[in-house]
Image (cartoon, helix red, strand yellow):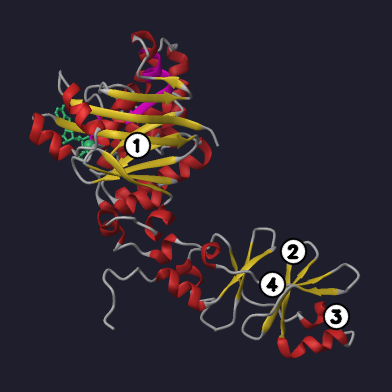
Amino acid sequence: MTDRIRVEHLYKVFSDMPKAALQRLAAGATKEQVQAETGQVVGLNNVSLSVPAGAIYMIMGLSGSGKSTLARCINRLIEPTAGRILLDGDDVVAADAAHLRDIRRTRVSMVFQHFALMPHRTVFENVEFGLKLRGISARERRKKAEEILSVVGLARWGHHLPSALSGGMRQRVGLARALATDADVLIMDEAFSALDPLIRTEMQDELLRLQRTLHKTILFITHDFQEALKLGTRIAIMADGAVVREGTPQEIVTAPGSDYVAAFTREVDRSRLFDARSVMVDAAPIVVRADGTADRAGPGRAGRSFVVDDAGRLIGTIAEADLPRLQQGISARTLAAAGCATVPGHARLADIAGACSTGQPVAVIDDGGRLLGCVEPAQILARIAAPAATAPHS
Ligand SMILES: Nc1ncnc2c1ncn2[C@@H]1O[C@H](COP(=O)(O)OP(=O)(O)OP(=O)(O)O)[C@@H](O)[C@H]1O
Ligand SMILES: [Mg+2]
C-alpha cells in the first residue's frame, strides 16, 4: 500500500528562537526538561509516521500530548520547526504560498470539533463554500452539494440555517463540507468529541459506512481509546509531543509496551476486538480428492478430524473412532456427512463464544466455505483475558 502521508522527524517548538530547544530535544531531552531549561513549550518531539492510502489513522493521547499540533502541521495551519511532511511524496513544509493554497483547497480538508460552520449561511452555502473558493460554477456547486448532503443523510436540510440543526446534524454538515471538496485526505480533529454518546456512536458507524465507498485517507484525532479502536486501521499513541506506540488496534492491545499505553487498554472488551482468525489454529484436515481417495494431514482435535475437498472447502468432521472405516472403503464424504459448527473468520469472539461452548472444535471458514482453521474454547478464553497487571500470588 502506498503512503499518502509521511511525517519524518517532525518537531514543533512554540518559540521564535527554537534552536536551543531543538538541540536539547535532539540530544534526547524530554518536553518537561526543555521547558524547565528554556521556558519553551514543545508541541512535537521527533514525530515520524506513515499513513497508508485508504486508512483511518488514529492519533490518540491525553490532553496536551500534541495531537492537534500534529494535525495542524500537516496542512501548515501551524508551521513545523523542523522535519518533513510528505503528501503523496510532495513536501508540504517546502511548499510556497500558492502551492499551499492548492493543497488546502483540493487535497486536504479538515473537520473540527465545534463544526466551525458559518451561522448566517444556510447548510447548503456552508457545504458549497470550498467549491466557491475554487471558482466552480453555481450549477455544479449545487449539484455536488446536493449529492453530498444526501450522502450524509441531510438531503432535506439544505435551506436551513445551522442553528436549526442538532449537534449531530451540524457535524454531518461539517463532514459534508469536507467531503464536497473531493480532497483525498480528511483530517478530523476530535470531530465527534462534542456529541452525546448515542449520537457519537451513530456518527462513528456513519463514518465507517461512508469510508467503505469513499476510501479517503483519514487522520482522526481523539483522546478516546475506545473510539480509536473502533475506527482505526492503525493507531499512533502520543505523550508529551512524541509517538510512544504505533500499530493496529489488535497489536496495541496485545502488546502495549508501556504502562502509559497499558492503562488505556485495561478496560477494552477484547471479545469485540479480536476475531476468529486471530485465535484459530491449524485444523490439519483430511483432504478428499475428486476420485474419492483421502489424505490425512495431521492428528485430529478433541477426537474428531476435519474433512475438506481438494479445493479446501469444508465437508464436515469424522470421529477418530471412525477413521479405520476409511480404510474399509467407506468414503470420507459419507463419514463426514454430519457436518460441524462453523464460524466466519471475521466473526468477533463475542459472537462465536456460543458456537464454541459445546467443547467440540469449531471450523473457521472464509466467505467461499474454505476451511481456514479451527478454534477451541481455551484459545478464546486466553485471548479474552487481559494480561494481569501484577504477578499473581504464588
Ligand atoms: N499556540 C501555542 N502556543 C504555545 N503552546 C502551544 C500552542 N498550541 C499548543 N501549545 C502547547 O503544545 C502542546 C500540545 O498541544 P495540543 O493542542 O497539540 O494538544 P492536544 O493533544 O491536541 O490536546 P487536547 O486533547 O487538549 O486537544 C501543549 O503543551 C500545549 O500547551
Ligand atoms: Mg487538540
Q: Is residue 127 magenta?
A: no
Which mark is in front, 2 or 1?
Answer: 2
Q: Amino acid at mark 4?
A: Ala
Q: Alpha-carbon distance for marks 1 and 4?
A: 50 Å
Mark 1 surroundings: few (<14), some (14-19) or many (≥20) residues within 10 A: many
Which residues are the magenta region? 101-116
Q: Amino acid at mark 3?
A: Ser
Percent across and percent down for residue 342 are 62, 71
Q: Nearer the N terminus, badge 2 or badge 4?
A: 4
Residue at the limit of the structure toward the bottom, as seen here:
321
Dot 3 and dot 2 residues touching (CB under 8 Å): no
Image disc number at residue 284: 4
The residue labelled by disc 3 is 331
Figure quadrant of residue 273: bottom left
Q: Nearer the N terminus, badge 4 or badge 3?
A: 4
Residue lying at 42% horizontally and 45% vertically, measured from the top left = 234
Residue at the limit of the structure toward the front, as seen here:
27
- Between residue 227 and residue 14, name the one nearer to us: 14
Q: Nearer the N terminus, badge 3 or badge 2?
A: 2
Figure quadrant of residue 110: top left
Q: Alpha-carbon distance for marks 1 and 3?
A: 60 Å
Q: Quadrant of the C terminus?
A: bottom left
The residue labelled by disc 1 is 172
Q: Alpha-carbon distance for marks 2 and 1?
A: 45 Å
- Between residue 183 and residue 138, name the one nearer to us: 183
Residue lying at 22% horizontally and 25% vertically, measured from the top left = 119
The residue labelled by disc 2 is 312
